[in-house]
Amino acid sequence: MLKGIFLDAAGTLIRLTKSVGAHYSLVASLLMTVGQMSFFDASEILAQDRNQQILELAVASPTAYALPLIARILVLTSMGIAGFAESWLMARFLFGIHMTIFHPGIFAITLIFTVLAGAATALITTAVFCLTRTTRTYQNAISGPLYLLSGALVPVSFLPAVLRPLSRLLYLFWSADLLRESMQPADPVSILPRLAAILILGGAIALDRYRVARAHELSAALSVSRNLTEELTQKGNELGKAHRALALAVRIARLEGLAVGRGRGAGKQERSEES
C-alpha cells in the first residue's frame, strides 16, 4: 500500500514539475521506493520472525542466522528498483514525459551502490527495531524527515541553512545528487568520491556493527570455552585425586590381605610344631 502511495505521489510530482525538470521527481520516487523496501519491509524481518516465533528456531539451526538474514534484506531492498520502472512508465504513458538517461553506466552503478547501502542500513535498523514493541511508529517517524533532509524530495537548498550540513551525512543525499546528474547532458564530476560516500555512510557502519557483533560472539564463545576448560581441568584434578586415593586404598587392601595371609600361615605353622 505504501509503495502505491509513493508511486502516486511520484506521478503528481512529475506532472507539477514538468516544466522545471521531472528528473527530480523520478529520482525521488526511486529513492522513496528503495527506502520503503529498506526501512519498512527489510527492517521488519527480525520483528516478524520474533512475533511468528520462528526466530528461536532460526538461531538454533546449524547455519549462522546472519547469512540468511543478510540475503533476505538484500533481496527485499533490491525489489525497490521496480519502483523506478513503474515511475518511468507512469511518466511516459500517463503524463507524456520522456526522460533520457545520458549516462546510463553511472546511473546503474549509483543505483547498485544505493541498494547495497540501503540493505546495509536495514541490517542495522532491523536489529534496533527488534528491541521495540511498536516497529511501525519508529519507521513512520524516521522515513519522512530522512527523505526531506537527504534532498531526495526537494533540493537541499530549500532546507534551512542549519540543516544543510546534516544532509551530507546521509547516503541518500549522495545517491540523489549523482542519479540526477547522470540524467543531465553534462558529465558528472567527482564520481568516485560520491560513490565512496554512499558505501561508507551506508555500508561501512553496518559492516562495523556486524564486525562488533561477531567480536562479541567470539568473545562469548571464548569465555564459554575458557569456563568449560577450567571446569574440565578441575574435574580432571578431582578424578586424579580420586584415582590416586583408590590406588592407595587398593594397595593398602593388598598389604592387609598379605598381612592376614602371613598371620594365618604363621598360626598354622605354630600349631603344627606344637602337635
Image (cartoon, helix red, strand yellow):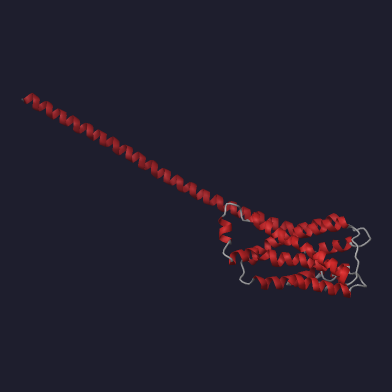
Q: Can residue 249 be seen in this view?
A: yes
Front-lying residue, 23 or 216: 23
Count of labels shown?
Answer: 0
> Going by the picture, which residue comes out furthest to the front?
93
Seen at 39% across and 41% down, the residue is 240
Location of the C terminus (image quadrant): top left
> In the rendered view, would you say 100 is above or below 266?
below
> In the rendered view, would you say 6 is above or below 259?
below
Q: Is residue 227 left or right of residue 18?
A: left
Q: Is residue 24 left or right of residue 120?
A: right
Question: Could you say where residue 135 lies in the image, as x and y percent from the top left?
Answer: 65, 70
Seen at 52% across and 49% down, the residue is 225
Location of the N terminus (image quadrant): bottom right
Question: Could you say where residue 71 lies in the image, as x and y percent from the top left?
Answer: 68, 56
Q: Locate residue 12: give its quadrant.
A: bottom right
Question: Could you say where residue 136 lies in the image, as x and y percent from the top left?
Answer: 67, 72
> Going by the picture, which residue comes out furthest to the left?
275
Q: Locate residue 123: give its quadrant.
A: bottom right
> In the rendered view, would you say 206 is above or below 271?
below
Q: Can residue 120 be seen in this view?
A: no
Question: Could you say where residue 94 lies in the image, as x and y percent from the top left?
Answer: 87, 72
Q: Locate residue 98: give its quadrant.
A: bottom right
Q: In this view, does 120 lie to the left or right of 50?
A: right
